[in-house]
Image: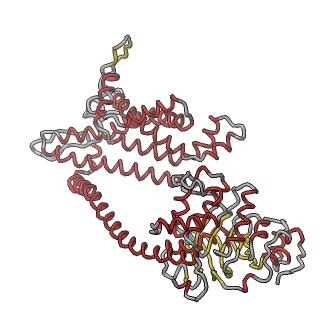
Amino acid sequence: MSTSVIEGVPPDPILERRELVQRVARRTLERRMVVSRGMVGLCGVTLLLALVPLFAILYSLIQKGIHWWSLDFFTKVPQFPSLLDPNDIGGISNAIIGSLVIDGVAALFAIPIGVVAGLFLAESDTKFASALRTTAEIMTGLPSILLGIFAYQMIVIGFNEWGIKLPGIGFSGIAGSFAIGVLMIPVIMKASETALRAVPTTIREAGLALGARRGVVARKVVIPTALPGLVTAVLLAFSRAVGETAPILWVIGASTMVQWNPKKEMASMPLAIFQSATSPYVALREAAWGIALFLVFVVLVLNLGSRLLAARLQRERR
Amino acid sequence: MADPSGTMVRLSTEMSDQTGDPRSGPVSMRFENVSVSFHGRTAIRDVSFDVPKNKVTSLIGPSGSGKTTLLRAINRMHDLTKGAVVSGSIRLGDTDIYKGGIPATLLRTRVGMVFQRPNPFPTMSIYDNVVSGLRFNGLRKRSVLDEAAESALIAAALWDSVSTRLKAHASTLSGGEQQRLCIARALAVEPEVLLMDEPTSSLDPISMRLIEELLSELKSRVTIVIVTHNMQQAARVSDLCAFFLMGNDRAGEQIEVAPTKKLFSEPDDPRTLDYIQGRFG
């Protein structure tokens, strides 16, 4: 050791250890750098592997779908191609409007219920709250087609069991909204709970210590603080619901007409993809790509939009 | 130079026993025109002074004067912050810590840090906490770890109370003990410099006193740089004192660096006098 070269001077254990630590740390770092480079390379490869299917899907969607986009495609209603013009399949305006109405009505009742329930989960530590939380978790894992069956039973044909009788209103947009909404509620609930729980306890306590009631603190302090997170939660749940097919598959009636009234039979974009893709007409089958591309586009806009909005709300705080 | 007769009696009785200029000895670190900015906004500007080896240097000043920002520049904690830029040069020995090509992880084994609140690793035992820095850096040999742990715990005045329960969880310790555990953890890798960011601000007065007393003993082992809001603490524990203020553009500036005794008795800058006499800040 270089510290004990001078004859008669006892070695300083601290200096010796300092030297040892430096030596070992340097050697370890060199070795780790090699491992690290390998690992970064591995991450790159796996990232690439994960991106390949994603880009393959986007590529085939755009390649096969974009040429269907035209003014007619977005403004006309669907029609069967004739022998004279086998490529004229009309448009999907009924499906766009149907999706808008169905998902809009669903959001109208699912967002308030979901956010309020999320607030309850975040603020309460009762047994009921934890039971509710478990229920929500189970519900998010529910196969979405079950909700379709549920909506069919409850809304389309009506409920008549255990002495309870509900009149059915038939195939309708409302039945779809009901299924989609029930699907959205647990997602919004969980996400808003997370956003609301992220508000530091000290900020909550600051309000309570001023004599504010918990409801007032929630309204004036907690919700405004968590707003960016809540907005993201709601919009992400909504964009997920827009693409859901199974719940609405046999409850909305698949109208081919433009229909704004949710009590009537309606169309919807995911359903239009399903119907086109399973149609006997080649042109309709091909046009399904165009609808699918538009649906992906809408979901993408909603996702990016929610992020931008949340980032903007966050920035306004400073 | 420092006034040996002590004109400020109340403080000078409390002051560290260092006489003469602590800067006459060897230099541990040299700041030259150090500035730190976040997203283009300067937090502290143009700091230039020498940190004497095996002494305690305190950084004082009101909130927003950039003390902590400067401290965190010394072990490159700002590397972890997006948008943070450190300019100028900080030299540790003959290494420029930013331009000298030293990896940040290696630098941090030479420059340890103790934070405002005790932050022992919650899942580790007392022993594992102390030797964690050594293990992170590849030291495995039991005898080396044991020796280092004992030495560090003794230095942190914790050995007597924990030597029989090294396997206990760190969370079983009191706040003051946890902070001394964090000091031991930082010491175990035998750094040349120990940075302390208001290490006693979350502790009770007795724990604070214990840690202050520790510092004078730790000096022989490490160079200490301590940020403190507590002027009495700076006066008690430090040999050299650097005073910072927030400038007109809200960037911190170095106002005066002087031996603690001089800074607290006859500072050169009227703003220093105002601050230590409590006229603002």
Residue A197, percent from left and from top:
54, 43
Nearest to the observer: residue B29 or residue A301: B29
Nearest to the observer: residue A256 or residue A143: A143
Left/right placement of residue A108 relative to residue B233 reads left
Residue B150, percent from left and from top:
58, 64
Residue A253, percent from left and from top:
27, 29
Left/right placement of residue A262 relative to residue B88 reads left
Which residue: 28% across, 55% down?
A: A54
Work out whether A26 lies above or below A162. Answer: below
Please tell me in which quadrant of the rendered image residue A161 appears.
top left
Please tell me in which quadrant of the rendered image residue A174 appears.
top left
Q: How is the image coloured?
A: secondary structure
Q: Is residue A208 visible?
A: yes
Nearest to the observer: residue A266 or residue B116: B116
Please tell me in which quadrant of the rendered image residue B215 appears.
bottom right
Task: Quadrant for the N terminus of chain B, please.
Answer: bottom right
Furthest residue in direction left, as rendered: A83
Work out whether B152 lies above or below B90. Answer: above
Task: Quadrant for the C terminus of chain B, please.
Answer: bottom right
Which residue: 54% across, 34% down?
A: A120
Nearest to the observer: residue B74 or residue B254: B74
